[in-house]
Amino acid sequence: MALEKPSDLTNEETMEAHLAEYLSWKMVKLAKFHMMDRVIVGRDSEGDHVRGWVELKWRTCPSTTYPTVMAAVEKTVFSYSLAEKSGLPYWFVVSYADVPDRSYWICRITEDILKGRIANTGRTDRGREHDIQPMYLIPLDLFTRVGPQPTGYEDVGEWRPSPDQEQGEFTF
C-alpha cells in the first residue's frame, strides 16, 4: 500500500508473527506499491513457492462496532483476479485492537463475496477525500476466528483453535 506508515508495518509484522504461530503460515511482505500485502510461501526441493495471497487489516475500532468489514472494491477485485488466475487462495485477515488475545478474523475471498453488498463509503476520520470509494461490506459472520481461546469479552464470529489443535481449511 502506497500510504502505509511505520506503525502500519509494525502492526502487519505483529499479525504475521501471530498467524505463523496459529496457522503455521510463512509470509513474505510484498513491495510497497503492490496491491497485496503478503504472500504465503512454502518450501519444497525446488525452493520457496507461493501458496496463497494475503491482505492484512489492523482495525482500531472495537470488534463489535460494525457487523461488516470494509474492503476497497478495486483492490479486492484485482486481488481476487490474481488469486483466480494463479489458482491460489486469497485470504483477507482482520485484527481488532480491543481483542486482548490478538485473535484474528479470516475470510477466503470467493466469487460469492464479490457478488455481495457494495457501498460508496470509507473512513472519514482522516479527512482524505480518496478514503471514500466503492467498498465491499463483507459480513463478519463470513469470517472464521483463529487464535488462542477467547476470554473476557463478547465473542464475534466462530472461534477456531490454534493449528496444533486443528488446522482445517487454512492448511495447504
Image (cartoon, rainbow, N blue to C red):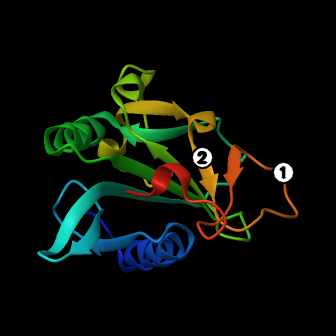
Q: Secondary structure at mark 2?
A: strand
Report how far apart the C-alphas of labels 1 and 2 lie in the structure: 15 Å
Between 133 and 12, the residue placed more toward the observer is: 12
Q: Circle 1 sits on which residue? A: 154
Above or below, comparing residue 72 to residue 62 in the picture: above
Amino acid on which disc 1 is placed: Glu
- In the rendered view, tell whether residue 73 sits above or below residue 33: above
Residue nearer the viewer, 17 or 134: 17
Image location (x, y in percent) of residue 162:
64, 66
Q: Label 1: state its secondary structure.
A: loop
Which residue is identified by label 2? 144
- The kind of residue on which mark 2 rests is Thr
Tag nearer the camera, 1 or 2: 2
Q: Earlier in the sequence, mark 1 or mark 2?
A: 2
Q: Quadrant of the C terminus?
A: bottom left
Looking at the picture, how far across and down is residue 95, in whole percent? Answer: 56, 60
Q: Residues within 10 Å of mark 1 (few under 14, many from 20)?
A: few
Give me the residue at 18% from left, 67% from top: 49
Report the side of 67 relative to 152 (left or right).
left
Q: Is residue 36 visible?
A: yes
Q: Kindly identify the residue that appears in the image at 69 percent across and 43 percent down.
A: 157
Q: Please tell me in which quadrant of the rendered image residue 43 appears.
A: bottom left
Left or right: 69 as drawn, with respect to 80: right
Mark number displayed over residue 123: none
